[in-house]
Amino acid sequence: MATREDILVELGLTPTWRRRGAVAALPAAIEREVPGAHALREPVPSFASSSGSAQDRGTRSARIASLSWDDFAADVDSCNACGLCRTRQKSVPGVGDADAEWLFVGEAPGAEEDVRGEPFVGQAGRLLDNMLAALGLARGRNVYIANVLKCRPPNNRTPEPGESDACRPYLERQVELIRPKLIVALGKSASSLLLGTDATIASLRGKVHQYRGVPLIVTYHPAYLLRNLPDKAKAWEDMVLARRTVATSDGSITSTEV
Ligand code: SF4
């Protein structure tokens, strides 16, 4: 049976002081695997918030709120509610078990995701898969993975507020369709959108929040962890809290300190 140390090693969460040389070499190795800047097909537009009147946006939100899984991906793929539709190669609606207990929400597709149409398939995705494995989970098995944005921001820049607002109805619908036992917000874009706060990850992690009645844990985005190895140990603490929350998910936990 795997010990906790074994799990930490598998997850890449061993303290960085134990293998200084290996830790120092990792970011460079990672950098080689991360694809270069995506060649844009047209100049990057200055993105505004979702176009149209408030009534139009309300009509659109209501339509998305009634989408079935059968229609969801096609609807995302035809969406032009923000300027990212002009630079994406593929939309990235999300992937996984439609009845999952665990919903992981990241920021936005990157270069590899944009090509393949699936979230978290690059180096950060491999780290997420390792985190799932350490929890006894696997992509697509009791797990659903989505992003705040369904289309890639050029050069992986941070989503703009108007883009997040325009894409918000899709994530809201995914939460309603999945009805997970737990949402794990990976990084600031996800925590900001879902919790409606600009608070830092450091101040939000270690507690069980609520999103529309669903327990929500905040932790670091895997891409951030690849650049900030010491914080991996904190991410593991968050996963332990997440596992405990799912195991006791009856709505009774609302503010548990790690
Ligand atoms: S990012 Fe979201 S709102 Fe913008 S075009 Fe893509 S699916 Fe539509």
Image (cartoon, rainbow, N blue to C red):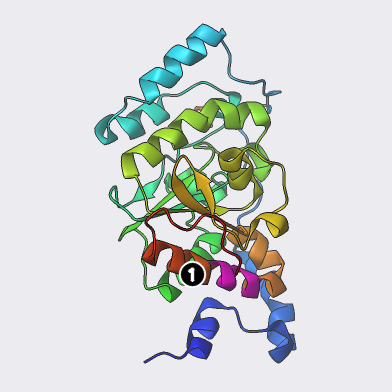
Tag 1: residue type?
Met
- Per the image, label 1 sits on a secondary structure element best described as helix
Is 229 left or right of 53, judged from the image as shown?
A: right
- Of 156 and 103, nearer the camera is 103
Q: Does the image show residue 117?
A: yes
- Of 168 and 153, nearer the camera is 168
Q: Position of residue 134 (x, y in %)?
A: 44, 75
Q: Quadrant of residue 236?
A: bottom right
Q: Position of residue 28 (x, y in %)?
A: 70, 71
Quadrant position of the N terminus in the picture = bottom left
Quadrant position of the C terminus in the picture = bottom right
Magenta segment range? 233-238
- Of 180 and 6, nearer the camera is 180
Q: Which residue is mark 1?
A: 131
Q: Does the image show residue 31?
A: no
Q: Position of residue 254 (x, y in %)?
A: 52, 54
Residue at (56, 48) in percent of width and height? 111
